[in-house]
Image (cartoon, grey):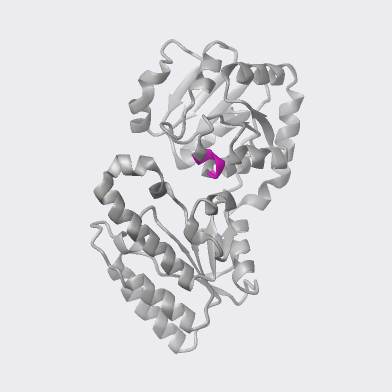
Amino acid sequence: MKAAFTQAGFEVFDLTGTARERSIKFRELKLQVKTGKKFDFMYSESATIPPMLGDPNHFPHPFLDAQIFAWFKRNGIPQSVFYRDIYWRFDEYVERVGKPLAAVMRLIYRMELSLYRRYMTRIYVPSLQMAAEIPQLVDTRVGELPPGGNTIDAQAENYPIRLLYVGGIGAHYQLHELVAAAKVNPDFFLTICTANNRWNEVANEYDISGCSNIRVVHRSSDELLDLYRNANIAAIVVNPTHYWRFAVPVKLFEYVNYGKPIIVSSGTLASQIVADNEWGWVINNDRADIERTLRYLADYPRQITQATERVLAKRSEHTWEARAKKVAADLSNFSPESSTADLT
């Protein structure tokens, strides 16, 4: 988002870093305002842990962020935060960290939300469905801000079927039915791109040895381009747990920005987005349904071409720059020629 604000024409004051670094930058920011600098709005993002514990050593700094937010409010500068994660609300979090630590951390998470409720002009979340999972966000100024992407052309032939999945694998990312469907159909090709350590934890669950049409790779960033150039359909075919009812995977909009139609599990928020935009095919997370859909697309490849065209027509609306412009429109009169954004 920092780069996106710059691309949108804003001058950005960077207030990120450790508590010490932010404290130094905050003094500089106040000095600039005192000498006449004008700031139109502030955009910030929460981490997966509360900012008071955000330093690498997790030493608590309980007052710094409150001081910064209070100063913005006193100076009449609209401010916002993107609240990205609610993993701490689920039983899995307690199982992972233990009850004593979970009880303390949940208290700190609620304190963080209270801080945002008090000071933020707008609290952004990936989806309004996620906001509904958080009682502390009821009756607050919540806005939806899904992930974005960077538009990159990656044209591919629409036959044979070459599926690509990019993302996590594990408890919330179960690909068993997708892999099972590919195993028995050697004329369908599936590439799974995930972290090496994550794959090693679950590889025995999938047993793809001897499956020449299935490969697992570990790539990121610019290394992904060749994968997208080889694929003609992107996949989000997972077990639709409760998490998927409100989750908006970053990869959904990465797929869109690479121009790929998407096959996606029903019962997920991602499937609603794909269906609403006609970006692909909503199917059951069932190997027979997956196989049936892929067989149909193999027989009628024009369906892939048409879905790809619909994705390409809409992808400019879902870039990171488009997301930055939305924030600017929400928080100020959008005027890139004279506007300045602050990033914390």
Q: Does the magenta stretch include residue 74?
A: no
Q: In this view, does 220 lie above or below 158?
A: below
User: Which sits in the foreground, 344 or 116?
Assistant: 116
Residue sticking out furthest to the bottom: 35
Residue at 67 percent of width and 16 percent of height: 295
Q: Where is residue 340 in the image (x, y as percent from the top left)?
A: 54, 74
Residue 115 lies in quadrant: bottom left
Residue 286 relative to residue 112: left or right: right
Give the x, y percent position of residue 144: 59, 56
Q: In the picture, which quadrant includes the C terminus?
A: bottom left
Q: Give the range drawn in magenta.
A: 243-248
Task: Note whether residue 220 is visible.
Answer: yes
For the point 58% across and 21% down, the residue is 286
Q: Where is residue 302 in the image (x, y as percent from the top left)?
A: 76, 25
Q: Nearer the viewer, residue 68 or 305?
A: 68
Q: In this view, does 245 lie above or below 127?
A: above
